[in-house]
Image: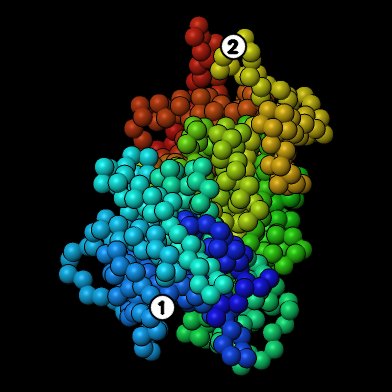
Amino acid sequence: MIILDENTPRWIRELGRFIHLKSLLFIHGNVLDLASYPVQRGDKSYWTETNLEDFFQRFLLGLGYEIVGIFDPVSGLNFAKEEPMHGWFDRIAKGERITQEDKAKVHPHNPHTLRRPLTPGVLPDPEPIIHNIAQVLANRDVPSAFVINFASRLVSAPDRLATKEQQLFTRILKASLESKEVLQQNQSWNNVLILVCDKLNDLPTFLYMNNPRARSIYLEKPTSTERNRFIQSNYSSFYGDNKTLAPELANQFSNLTEDFSYYELLSLVGLSRREQIPVENIRNLCERFKYGITESEWDKLDKNRLAKAENFIRKRIKGQDSAVRRLLELIKRARLGLAAGASHKSQRPRGVLFFAGPTGVGKTELAKALAELLFGREERLVRFDMSEYSAAHADQKLLGAPPGYVGYEEGGKLTNAVKEQPFSVLLFDEVEKAHPAIFDKFLQILDDGRLTDGKGETVYFSECIIIFTSNLGAVVAQDNLPGARRQLVTPDMTYPQVQETILQSIRDHFNLVLGRPEILNRFGENFVVFDFIRPPVDEQIIDRLLLQLTASLAEQQKLQLRIQRPVRDTLVKLARKHLEHGGRGIRNILDAALINPLAERLFELELKPGATVHLYQLLEHNGQSKQRFTLELTVNDAPA
């Protein structure tokens, strides 16, 4: 018999209460999972996990129901005890009554459901079955309960019912309204109809709206308490000689298996035994289950490479000491698995940073450098331009469209990327341009470290580093010129002034514009404000770009390029007029003043491989429409 006490899952206690009060019950939510419940047998009690159909049979028989029928669109109607239930059902459906004498003639029977054979390839017609169920629910002699499993599959679209579907569900509603109470020997039972569906709105609303005889009960996934109870009950079933369960291990198991179903919890037991992973190594076991990996890439990181992380990053990022320091802190915390804080709950991402500041100062470049440092390749940076997600339903592009919608089978860009490579750096660029609905998804990622995609699959972010970038505070829209923007912070400001202006703009945006202070709180102290490119950093950037240019010419055209000091000094002078655009502005100047005229001259000269080009003067001409630049150069032909 199923035990109903304070330890029994909430939905079962709720079912036990309302089955005596209502004639139409809806069970929805985690209905495809196993049901876990406590059972009393003699003097002993234990917990068991069975499918939902077996649970209903045991539960309803334990309450004294004498006809317990389970219907589904594939197997038809079957009974918890085929005899005498089938016979009584048929007789009542024909208008006959079942007397106490009839019940006294019952012989011992098989307690298990007996499936009646169906015609191969022919699905049962629910219409006559529901008609007969309605007849039995209206009887006052035999307590009767029926469960319609997979009720969501009986309807194609609840808001656009076909004529036959409309008739079927109207018959179900009428059957529940005409259901009777059975009184026997100072006991009473409600004849009851139970519909099991994925979501309540899978069914027509007229079944439950303003229906005092109806009650919906949500079946949730195992709670933290229930997962803790599961490991205590099943500890000895994991691989190894498990005798005593430490409370710390039970808590860690409960935290690492958040959002797991009972089926998945039992699968962990099977995985542990099959691959000989002891439950004490629960983190490795969960990672194997979630990601299909045998070893965490965080554990494989080259310590010597990490020890040289500062030099590696500073070679690529110039003039951003504050940002580099914060990034190095993040790397150390992430490597040790401390990014989620001091608690045992470690489902949150390995690290989170919010890069803010002027354009072209290295925000995206620093994220690329991090991906290459950690995982050896810049391609491990997955970038999302949030300006592409400004529409109302943009979250479907990230997570995937719901079932039945165009693109459902493709999944979402974000969830697909993390499924494919759970160890990644995720960059959400210019996050302020995203639709406000997207921020709800970010909240879930930052808090819980997981998302459910359009296919219902859970995707975990606990091994990712997440970086947001924003230009908030760097530019502001001009009211009198739609689409135009003006600079809010300028290079003549000190870095503390730039930092305070930008941080205040971010606070105003989330608190006042979006009205979402909870999002601001999730970022915490992870804001990193980038400074403008300032002298002499601009010279370092120019030198690096010139070095890349000479290397590219040598590799692709087999030409040696020699840039004399006057050319370099002229480029520095030109670049300092555009420092408000950062490194991108410097690159643009090099393109316009050096690379474009150089390419034009080289194309005209048609030099042979091995030649050396000397650039000794860069001249600027002020034209009517735009500036023009010319180069003075000499060429040494390739040696014969």
Q: Residue 608, located in which quarter of the rendered image?
A: top left
User: Closest to the observer: 427 or 130?
Assistant: 130
Dot label at residue 100: 1
Image quadrant for the N terminus?
bottom right
In the rendered view, tell whether residue 586 sits above or below residue 60: above
What residue lies at 64% left-to-right and 15% top-to-bottom? Answer: 478
What residue lies at 74% left-to-right and 50% top-to-bottom? Answer: 326
What residue lies at 43% left-to-right and 47% top-to-bottom? Answer: 207
In the rendered view, tell whether residue 381 sits above or below residue 68: above
What colour scheme has been applied to the protein in the rendered image? rainbow
Residue 598 in sight from this viewpoint: yes
Image quadrant for the C terminus?
top left
Dot label at residue 481: 2
N-terminal of the pair, mark 1 or mark 2, is 1
Q: CA distance from mark 1 to mark 2?
A: 88 Å
Mark 1 secondary-structure assignment? helix
User: Closest to the observer: 45 or 380?
Assistant: 45
User: In the image, residue 170 lies at what x, y percent?
Assistant: 35, 47
